[in-house]
Image (cartoon, helix red, strand yellow):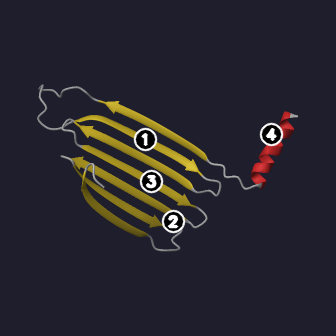
Amino acid sequence: MTRILLAGAAALGLMSGAVMAQSTITTTSTTNTGVPVGGSLSAPVVVSGSSTNGHSVTADGDQHFVAGTKTRDSAGNTSETTITNTSYPLTDMVTSTRKTTNVSNGVATETTVTTNSFPSGRAAGTTSTSTRTYTVGSN
């Protein structure tokens, strides 16, 4: 009886066009609190860092991969980079976005590079770059 109910639920989900997706997320963090050889901090050194990545697939075959890293040095400066790759098999297009934000002395510089490409070569790819600078805590 249970098998029949499960089979019926699966068939109903497929017939109703329910979206099924698979996803995976992994996160790692590291912290370095040691003092370099020589006993003094003459230049900023990385004291903490983390990275995250994830992958998902939608019902229509779109694949998404995201990877990100963030580091902080002993002077309080941070750097964060996120790379997103999305593959659209129905249109034969791949979109890659790389966003990098560096914060130093309360001033952030954010650079975003977006590339659209067509692996089959049926169309020319495009790349756009934008950069903005702002004070942390403002929009």
Give the distance between the C-alpha atoms of the residues marked 3 and 1, in whole angstroms: 12 Å
Q: Secondary structure at mark 1?
A: strand
Residue annotated with mark 2: 119
Residue visible at 54% across and 68% down in the picture: 120
Q: Nearer the viewer, mark 4 or mark 1?
A: 4
Instruction: Check contact, mark 2 vs mark 1: CB within 8 A.
Output: no
Residue visible at 35% across and 59% down in the picture: 112
Residue annotated with mark 1: 52
Residue 70 quadrant: top left
Q: Amino acid at mark 4?
A: Leu
Q: Amino acid at mark 3?
A: Thr
Earlier residue among tags 4 and 1: 4
Badge 3 local density, few (<14 within 10 Å), some, or many (20+)? some
Badge 4 local density, few (<14 within 10 Å), some, or many (20+)? few
Badge 2 local density, few (<14 within 10 Å), some, or many (20+)? few
Give the distance between the C-alpha atoms of the residues marked 3 and 2, in whole angstroms: 17 Å
Q: Position of residue 26 (x, y in %)?
A: 48, 38
Q: Secondary structure at mark 2?
A: loop
Q: Amino acid at mark 1?
A: Thr
Q: Position of residue 122 (x, y in %)?
A: 53, 73
Give the distance between the C-alpha atoms of the residues marked 2 and 1, in whole angstroms: 27 Å
Q: Position of residue 43 (x, y in %)?
A: 14, 38
Quarter of the N terminus within the rendering: top right
Frontmost residue, 41 versus 77? 77
Residue annotated with mark 4: 6
